Image (cartoon, rainbow, N blue to C red):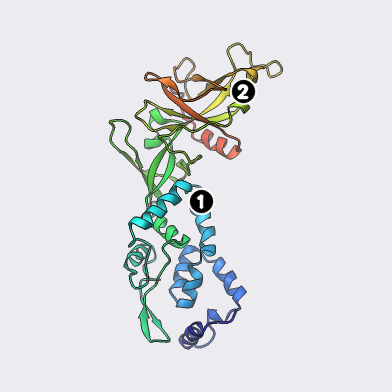
């Protein structure tokens, strides 16, 4: 690809600065390979060299892999919707329109203070130019996440530092990243009359993107009930009362009381009743098991035992293993 007149002028200026060959002398494919191998900080530094490199370094295709690698497993559809709302409501954060770049420059200087914070000289007009970044770019989203400026929705396992009342559960929260500690601060929505709860220092391993795109206030419509067999691993919505949002709780499908568990004679899958067991609780606990109707399951429960909602079957070993790694050290009452 041939260089534009502006890029040729920048290349000439770079050649004068370096006393010879510059990175813009590389063939287009070679330059692209170099940029694809740069980490995020390297791309930001390279983008601060000149306009031509900046246009390349802010490209979505370069930032997409960085976004997926670091943030892909905690950012879901709800977070992307929140990002769009974030852009619309706060034009000065990460949007950096031409001639008005102060918001993005403040954001960027927190994490990479030297690469983009200094104006560059335009070799054509001999004037100083500020950096600009498309508001809806992947780079803009990545930097807002990385600097903790964007609070996004996700889910937290064993909320509130593993409070005994939330063991082996996963609840929705608003999160923002703390780059100093490589952890997150979580804000949980109010439960009934209970105020918003906050938790600091939440590690990466206790986070996930929401497993289904369903609001925690809404019942998830189960599509797996007819496929459930004893031994299957599941997550089920549960809430303490109707004023509370749902959380997701880990369990397994059990056998009916009339079944001895012998797989050669088991007919539990033919019954309309499905037994769900929560082995983190001691036998005899009222939380140890519950039953749902396979054909007509909606929300079931009462004010004493809480309300059970939608069910999703866990089919991936990775999901099951993650729940098992969070298993409590002691059986719960």
What residue is shown with label 2? Answer: 230
| Helix, strand or loop under label 1 | loop
Residue at coordinates 62% horizontally, 73% vertically from top-left?
A: 29
Which image quarter holds the C terminus?
top left
Q: Quadrant of residue 106?
A: bottom left
- Confirm or deny contact between disc 1 and disc 2 (CB under 8 A): no
Which image quarter holds the N terminus?
bottom right
* First in residue order: circle 1 vs circle 2: 1
Local crowd size for mark 2, using a 10 Å CA cut-off: few (<14), some (14–19), many (≥20) = many
Residue 190 x %, y %: 32, 35
In the picture provided, is 57 more to the left or to the right than 135?
right
Query: Who is closer to the viewer here, 137 or 332?
Result: 137
Residue 87 x %, y %: 38, 57
Residue at coordinates 34% horizontally, 61% vertically from top-left?
A: 91
What residue is shown with label 1? Answer: 72
Residue 79 x %, y %: 44, 49
């Amino acid at each position: 690809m041939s260089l534009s007149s502006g890029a040729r002028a920048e290349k000439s200026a770079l050649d004068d600065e370096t006393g010879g060959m510059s990175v813009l002398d590389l063939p287009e494919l070679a330059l692209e390979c170099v940029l694809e191998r740069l980490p995020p900080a390297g791309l930001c530094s390279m983008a601060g060299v000149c306009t031509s490199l900046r246009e390349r370094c802010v490209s979505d295709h370069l930032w997409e892999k960085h976004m997926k690698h670091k943030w892909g497993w905690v950012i879901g559809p709800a977070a992307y919707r929140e990002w769009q709302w974030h852009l619309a409501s706060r034009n000065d954060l990460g949007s950096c329109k031409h001639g008005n770049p102060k918001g993005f420059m403040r954001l960027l200087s927190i994490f990479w203070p030297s690469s983009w914070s200094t104006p560059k000289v335009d070799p054509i007009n001999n004037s100083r130019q500020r950096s600009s970044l498309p508001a809806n770019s992947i780079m803009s989203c990545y930097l807002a996440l990385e600097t903790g400026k964007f609070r996004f929705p996700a889910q937290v396992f064993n909320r509130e530092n593993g409070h005994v009342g939330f063991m082996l559960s996963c609840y929705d929260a608003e999160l923002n990243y703390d780059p100093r500690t490589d952890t997150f601060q979580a804000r949980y929505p109010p439960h009934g009359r209970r105020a918003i709860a906050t938790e600091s220092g939440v590690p990466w391993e206790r986070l996930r993107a929401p497993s289904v795109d369903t609001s925690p206030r809404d019942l998830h419509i189960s599509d797996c009930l007819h496929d459930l067999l004893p031994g299957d691993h599941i997550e089920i919505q549960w809430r303490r009362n109707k004023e509370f949002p749902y959380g997701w709780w880990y369990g397994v499908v059990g056998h009916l009381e009339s079944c001895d568990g012998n797989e050669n004679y088991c007919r539990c899958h033919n019954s309309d009743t499905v037994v769900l067991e929560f082995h983190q609780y001691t036998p005899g606990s009222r939380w140890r098991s519950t039953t749902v109707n396979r054909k007509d399951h909606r929300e079931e429960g009462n004010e004493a035992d809480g309300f059970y909602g939608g069910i999703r079957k866990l089919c991936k070993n990775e999901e099951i293993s993650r729940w098992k790694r969070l298993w409590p050290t002691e059986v719960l009452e």
